[in-house]
């Protein structure tokens, strides 16, 4: 009788523990490639396009043009894009996107979060020089990640490039 009770208790415990196992999280924005193309890239483009300088030849005359945010709404749009990029970094660090990709993936996701905080502060400060400088840093974080995790390899089930799992 005790043996039967022990078996039933063990079975009940295993059943209870089995219900605690979670299925892998479903990526909320689709595959990593879809997430980058549909959300991260367009948001980064807002930030990168906020300030700049162009020089072009028009009818034989050099025309220089500097562009920068003009209104509080323009500045808010830049700050909002930085906040969204930070949130996207958090999403990229979630198990839905990071599982099986190695520690470098988490480092890049954290790098995106860190530089996005700087980007937001530059927008809050309405500092065009800082916007430009932080935009370059943002680009470098993105480029470094894409070297370790080429977009062509971000389809579901594709292992990362050699070295990406090494934490280098």
Image: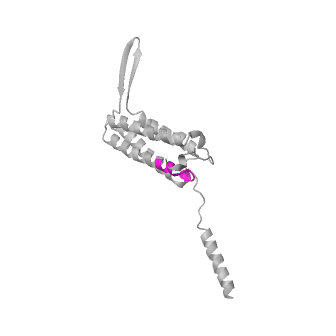
Q: Position of residue 143 (x, y in %)?
A: 48, 38
| Residue 43 is one of the magenta-drawn residues | no
Region in magenta: 96-107
Q: Position of residue 20 (x, y in %)?
A: 58, 67
Q: Residue furthest top?
A: 60
Q: Decide whether the magenta segment is chiefly helix, strand or loop.
A: helix
Q: Position of residue 154 (x, y in %)?
A: 58, 44
> Which residue is at a point 57% across and 52% down the rendered structure image?
100
Q: Is residue 45 above or below residue 29?
A: above
Name which quarter of the figure residue 129 lies in.
top left
> Which residue is at a point 41% across and 15% down the rendered structure image?
57
Name which quarter of the figure residue 84 lies in.
top left
Look at the image and tell me in which quarter the N terminus lies. bottom right
Q: Is residue 44 left or right of residue 15?
A: left
Q: Is residue 10 above or below residue 65?
A: below
Q: Position of residue 34 (x, y in %)?
A: 57, 42
Q: Is residue 95 left or right of residue 86?
A: right
Residues 128 and 133: in front is 133
* Residue 120 appears anywhere in the view: yes
Q: Is residue 11 above or below residue 20?
A: below
- Count numbered badges in the picture: 0
């Amino acid at each position: 009788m005790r043996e039967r009770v022990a078996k039933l208790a063990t079975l009940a415990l295993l059943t209870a523990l089995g219900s605690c196992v979670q299925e892998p999280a479903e990526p909320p924005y689709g595959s990593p490639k879809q997430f980058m193309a549909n959300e991260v890239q367009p948001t980064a483009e807002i930030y990168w396009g906020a300030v700049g300088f162009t020089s072009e030849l028009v009818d034989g005359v050099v025309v220089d043009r500097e562009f920068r945010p003009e209104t509080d709404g323009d500045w808010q749009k830049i700050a909002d894009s930085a906040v969204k990029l930070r949130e996207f970094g958090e999403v990229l660090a979630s198990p839905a996107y990071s599982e099986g990709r190695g520690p470098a993936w988490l480092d890049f996701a954290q790098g995106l979060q860190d530089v996005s905080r700087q980007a937001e502060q530059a927008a809050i400060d309405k500092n065009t020089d800082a916007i430009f400088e932080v935009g370059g840093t943002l680009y470098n974080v993105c480029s470094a990640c894409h070297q370790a995790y080429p977009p062509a390899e971000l389809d579901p089930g594709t292992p990362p490039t050699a070295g990406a799992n090494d934490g280098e």
